[in-house]
Image (cartoon, rainbow, N blue to C red):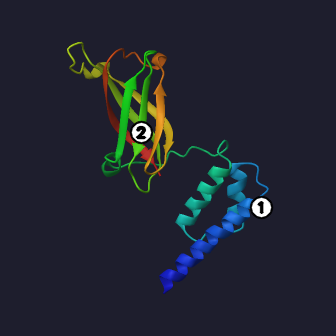
Amino acid sequence: MKKQIFILIGFLAIISTTNVLAESKAMTYQDCILEVTRDGFFQSRRDVGRIKELCEERFPDTAPVMLGDKLNNEALDKIEIYTNRTDKGEINGTVYNGNSYLIVTRLDLLITPKTKKGSVEDFFDSEDFELNLKVKPYATESFTIEPEKTNIDGQFSWKLIRAWGY
């Protein structure tokens, strides 16, 4: 019974927050957060996350990109990356976040050139790339690495080294 009451209170807080945001005079993400938190419309950590999400949706241009925490191996295993090279030399890719509760905010990739024989060249020819993005749970996001940012021509392999999220 207590659990049901807490769930109901949390649900009502979110509805109240949504109504407050609809009537809000906030002009930026920061104003939105301040207005809602000042009025005390959150009961739990989950409510705070929902408030941040609502403010981000309303003010996407002024919302900060949060790096979050370094993800563990279990979370890394649920991230899939598909890449290809365009005629212009760009490396295009798509990231799929298979985590049910984490938003991925940054990926560190190690890209290594392949020799003409198809084998991977020396590790010292590899390049580390930092991709800042925002991939919600069970969603995809595209990225492009411009040819000016890499010395790697032709075929390549890549490895996900680290990722961050919240």
**Residue located 73% across and 53% down the image:** 31
- Number of other residues with Cα within 10 Å of mark 2, as a class: few under 14, some 14 to 19, many 20 or more: many
Does label 2 or label 1 sit earlier along the sequence?
A: 1
SS class of the residue under badge 2?
A: strand
Q: In the figure, is residue 124 to the left or right of 103? A: left
In x, y percent, where is residue 81? 37, 37
Viewed as shown, does residue 90 lie left or right of 57?
Answer: left
Residue in the foreground of this view, choosing between 7 and 127: 7
Q: Residue at x 59, y 77 (%)?
A: 9
Which element type, helix, strand or loop, lies under badge 1? Answer: helix
Question: Would you call the spot at circle 1 few (<14 residues within 10 Å), some (14-19), or many (20 or more)?
Answer: few
Up-down relation of residue 156 to residue 24 (above or below): above
Q: Amino acid at mark 2?
A: Val
Q: Does the image show residue 41?
A: no
**x and y, in percent, of residue 86 in the image:** 42, 20
Relative vertical location of residue 75 with respect to residue 161 in this rendering, above or below: below
Residue placed farthest to the front in the image? 87
Residue 67 in the image, given as x and y percentages of width and height: 50, 45
Q: Any mark on residue 80, and which?
A: none
- Three-letter amino acid code of the residue under disc 1: Glu
Mark 1, residue position: 23
Circle on res. 95? 2
Residue farthest toward the bottom in the current orientation of the protein: 1
**Contact check, label 2 and label 1, Cβ < 8 Å:** no
Which image quadrant for residue 37?
Answer: bottom right
Closer-to-camera residue (14/37): 14
Up/down of 163 relative to 114, above or below: below
Frontmost residue, 95 versus 27: 95
